[in-house]
Image (cartoon, helix red, strand yellow):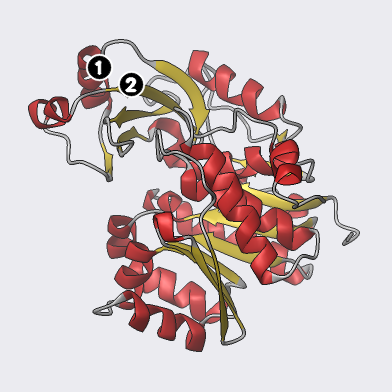
């Protein structure tokens, strides 16, 4: 299924390098880290945590960037917009995403400018596979409208916006520019809510986008409840059926509920062992969007998302280690 556009999906979000380490639960308590959430930290706290962590792996990350990386691995025409500095971690990020066939042309913050560096996320993985993220946004926080190429957005069938990126000072203006360019050219807009605390910070803006701009919302069960401020997941799903043209609401080991035009289907989770939950939602979105651009039905899109998410949780780190095309073939999801 082709659209005539240069890109199937263009993602906009935080350009981050993940620094991952396995730690016992006692480490979180001793380090003052709240388990299972993403917490924003400053440069000094990033240095402090890095010194406490012990052996770690550096892997390119960032929520929307992980999604776009997955799409690149699946052979989709993908591009990414996110800010890094001309430094060591910035070079790692740019190389890794381009190596997957993704177009990445966001101007680097100059090395000569003092101040923020390339963003990094300290991902602390406990024995139960839960990840606690401490994120120093660095220069990714300064993504501005000047970084948004309107022609790139116009050449996208879908643009995919990261909820976390709303925390930046110029983010709303940057997103507005991207959405306008995409919509004016007949493109569609997807948003991932990212985190319940992110929803709490930006609920009014997210609800406005749901009413006025979005064609697709990605959320997990906690995020959708936070968005609609309901007592139960069932109530939140009812609201989603009434108010959203399309939504994919993941429910962990229970799979995903996919909503389209007031109807809902359920796809089960893929049978993979959970080692590290980092990137599960990101890769779910990659699989789901891949299905959409290939013209698959909602149940198949949801199944593709669950299989890609299953790959992500089966190892340390958010980027796929197995060829997603081969994995889809094993599950009878060719194409």
In the image, residue 66 lies at what x, y percent? 56, 39
Q: Earlier in the sequence, mark 1 or mark 2?
A: 2
Say few, some or many: other residues with alpha carbon within 10 Å of mark 1 (under 14 / 14 to 19 / 20 or more).
some
In the image, residue 156 lies at what x, y percent? 76, 56
Say few, some or many: other residues with alpha carbon within 10 Å of mark 2 (under 14 / 14 to 19 / 20 or more).
many
**In the picture shown, does residue 308 fall above or below 258?**
above
Q: Nearer the viewer, residue 227 or 322?
A: 322
315 to the left or right of 131 = right
Tell me, yes or no, whether the two marked residues, 1 and 2, touch with CB atoms within 8 Å: yes
Instruction: Label 1, secondary structure: give it.
Output: helix
Q: Image quarter for residue 23?
A: top left
Q: Residue at x 47, y 59 (%)?
A: 172
201 to the left or right of 117 = left
Residue highlighted by disc 2 = 21
Q: Image quarter for residue 299?
A: bottom right
In the image, residue 171 lies at what x, y percent? 46, 53
User: Which image quadrant: the N terminus?
Assistant: bottom right
**In the picture shown, does residue 119 fall above or below 286?**
above
**In the picture shown, does residue 76 fall above or below 198?**
above
Residue highlighted by disc 1 = 53
């Amino acid at each position: 299924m082709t659209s005539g556009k240069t890109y199937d999906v263009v993602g906009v979000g935080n350009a981050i390098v993940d620094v991952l380490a396995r730690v016992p639960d006692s480490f979180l308590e001793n380090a003052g880290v709240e388990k299972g959430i993403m917490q924003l930290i400053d440069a000094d706290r990033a240095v402090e945590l890095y010194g406490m962590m012990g052996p770690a792996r550096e892997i390119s990350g960032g929520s929307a960037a992980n999604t776009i990386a997955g799409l690149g691995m699946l052979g989709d025409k993908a591009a990414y917009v996110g800010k890094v500095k001309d430094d060591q971690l910035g070079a790692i990020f740019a190389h890794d995403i381009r190596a997957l066939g993704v177009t990445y042309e966001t101007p680097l913050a100059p090395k000569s400018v003092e101040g923020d560096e390339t963003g990094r996320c300290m991902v602390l993985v406990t024995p139960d596979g839960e990840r606690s993220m401490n994120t120093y946004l660095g220069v990714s926080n300064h993504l501005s409208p000047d970084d948004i190429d309107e022609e790139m957005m116009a050449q996208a069938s879908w643009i995919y916006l990261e909820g976390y990126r709303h925390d930046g000072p110029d983010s709303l203006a940057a997103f507005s520019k991207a959405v306008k360019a995409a919509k004016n050219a007949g493109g569609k807009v997807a948003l991932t809510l990212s985190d319940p605390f992110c929803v709490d910070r930006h609920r009014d803006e997210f609800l406005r986008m749901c009413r006025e701009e979005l064609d697709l919302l990605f959320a997990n069960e906690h995020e959708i409840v936070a968005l609609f401020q309901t007592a139960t997941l069932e109530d939140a799903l009812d609201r989603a059926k009434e108010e959203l043209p399309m939504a994919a609401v993941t429910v962990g080991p229970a799979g995903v509920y996919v909503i389209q035009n007031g109807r809902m289907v359920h796809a089960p989770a893929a049978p993979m062992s959970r080692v590290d939950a980092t990137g599960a939602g990101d890769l779910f979105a990659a699989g789901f969007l891949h299905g959409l651009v290939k013209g698959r039905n909602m149940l198949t899109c949801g199944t593709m998302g669950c299989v890609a998410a299953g790959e992500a949780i089966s190892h340390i780190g958010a980027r796929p280690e197995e060829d997603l095309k081969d994995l889809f073939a094993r599950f009878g999801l060719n194409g």
